[in-house]
Every structure is written in C-alpha cells, then in structure tokens.
Amino acid sequence: MPDAKLLEVFESPTESAFVIEHIAEEFTSVCPKTGHPDFGEVTLRYQPRPANAGGTCVELKSLKLYYHSFRSEGIFYEAVTNQIRDDLVALMDPAWLQIITNWRGRGGIRSVIRADYGDIPAHFRGR
C-alpha cells in the first residue's frame, strides 16, 4: 500500500527560485481490473519555496522507497498520479509542483497523465 510516511525532506539550499526535476524510469503498480503489472515513468518537477520561507526538498532515497510502495497496489493511472501529487504537496508545500506519469502501452494504447499544483514558474514556462 502506498505510504507517504516513507517520504523525508531537507531544507531548501537557497532563497533563489529554482526548479528540480526527478525522473523515475522504473515505476510499477498493478491494474485493479486485470491484476497485471503496469509499468511507467514518473517525472516530478517542482519549485521549492525559498529557504527563508520554510522551503523543503524531497530526499531521493525516501522518494524511491515511496514509489516502490505502489508496486503491489491495485490502482488506476489517474489515481497514482494524483495521489503522488497530493502526498508531495502535503509534505513540502512547494510553490509549484507537477507530476507526469508516462505509462507503457497496453492493448495499443499509451497513457500520459499530468497533475499540477500552483502556477508554473515564469522561468520554467515552455519546457
């Protein structure tokens, strides 16, 4: 079962605006209809709040363990994407956050799901 308690943070290293992007290429969950594994890639992009405003960043090993907690979970693509967004927003309260899940094809159909929080930073628009 997905476990947000696995997630840890550290203080943002700067008061300047910057965007972090982490890509997990080997994400796995289970289709709740068929019980078959679903394989995908999760891209996390976010702008932490400044250090002087209590900004935090997610620690990578904890993020990996959190992602692994989905491995045996029967959950739809859309629910995965939104749950990751909601858990990370609750953890870090970033200025902006985007989760993109890119699922490998099944039955000739590939799916890409996006879930956003906040306004896209001006210096990151168009990427």
Image (cartoon, rainbow, N blue to C red):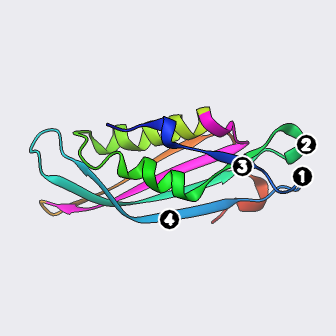
Q: If the image is split into quadrants, where does the N terminus sit?
A: top left
**103 falls in the magenta region:** yes
Which mark is first along the chain, 1 or 2?
1
Q: Amino acid at mark 1?
A: Glu
Asked if residue 62 lies left or right of residue 17, the reply is: left
Residue toward you, 58 or 47:
58
Task: Provide the secondary structure element on which disc 1 rests.
Answer: loop
Which residue bears the numbered disc 2? 52
Is any part of residue 86 visible from this angle?
yes
Cα separation, mark 2 vs mark 1, equals 6 Å
Which residue bears the numbered disc 4? 23
Cβ atoms at labels 1 and 3 below 8 Å apart: no
Query: Start and end of the magenta stretch?
Result: 91-106
Q: Residue at 66% of width from left, 39% of height from top?
A: 92
Asked if residue 106 lies left or right of residue 26, the reply is: left
Cβ atoms at labels 4 and 1 below 8 Å apart: no
Cβ atoms at labels 2 and 1 below 8 Å apart: yes
Cα separation, mark 2 vs mark 4, equals 27 Å
Task: Provide the secondary structure element on which disc 3 rests.
Answer: strand
Task: Provide the secondary structure element on which disc 4 rests.
Answer: strand
Which residue bears the numbered disc 1? 15
Q: Amino acid at mark 2?
A: Asn
Q: Nearer the viewer, mark 2 or mark 4?
A: 2
Q: Residue 32: x percent and y percent? A: 17, 39
Which mark is first along the chain, 2 or 3?
3
Q: Amino acid at mark 3?
A: Phe
Q: Residue at 51% of width from left, 52% of height from top?
A: 63
Q: Amino acid at mark 4?
A: Ile
Q: Residue 8: x percent and y percent? A: 60, 45
Cα separation, mark 4 vs mark 3, equals 19 Å
Which residue bears the numbered disc 3? 10
